[in-house]
């Protein structure tokens, strides 16, 4: 059985991961942003973006690429005993 603190930490990790992921989808629906000749920075359908939006997108994307694997590893480590027990039942 998972202890109370492990459950609480797991919920916090999952909420942070979800908010970061869906927040980025909300803020950057036309991701990925890239450099383009016409406007400086564009979304995938050619919508113009500012340099600040591009920099913010880059921060979000990098944090997502590093944060999600770290979050998944943290969740695994928090629940590894429960995962092992489930494997022994069968």
Image (cartoon, rainbow, N blue to C red):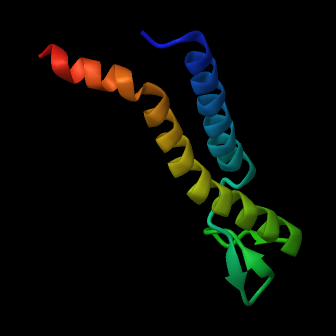
Quadrant of the image containing the N terminus: top left
Residue at the left extreme, as displayed: 90
Q: Which of 77 and 27 is in front in this view?
A: 77
**Position of 11 relative to 75 (above/below):** above
Question: What residue lies at 80% left-to-right and 70% top-to-bottom?
Answer: 55
Where residue 62 appears, as percent x and y from the top left, is: 65, 63
**Position of 19 relative to 79 (above/below):** below
Question: What residue lies at 65% left-to-right and 61% top-to-bottom?
Answer: 61
Disc count in the image? 0
Q: Nearer the viewer, residue 7 or 39?
A: 7
Question: What residue lies at 67% left-to-right and 35% top-to-bottom?
Answer: 16
Quadrant of the image containing the C terminus: top left
Question: What residue lies at 62% left-to-right and 68% top-to-bottom?
Answer: 45
Q: Where on the picture, by quarter, is residue 41?
A: bottom right
Left or right of 39: which side holds 1? left
Q: Where on the picture, by quarter, is residue 6?
A: top right
Where residue 80 appears, as percent x and y from the top left, is: 38, 29
Where residue 17 appears, as percent x and y from the top left, is: 62, 39
Where residue 13 appears, as percent x and y from the top left, is: 62, 32
Q: Which of 72 and 36 is in front in this view?
A: 72
Left or right of 79: which side holds 7? right
**Position of 83 relative to 23 (above/below):** above
């Amino acid at each position: 059985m998972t202890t109370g603190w492990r459950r609480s930490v797991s919920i916090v990790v999952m909420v942070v991961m979800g908010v970061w992921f869906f927040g980025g989808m909300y803020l950057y629906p036309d991701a990925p942003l890239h450099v383009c000749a016409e406007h400086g920075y564009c979304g995938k359908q050619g919508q113009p973006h500012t340099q600040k939006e591009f920099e913010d997108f880059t921060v979000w994307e990098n944090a997502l690429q590093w944060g999600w694997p770290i979050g998944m590893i943290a969740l695994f480590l928090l629940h590894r005993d429960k995962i092992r027990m489930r494997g022994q039942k069968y």
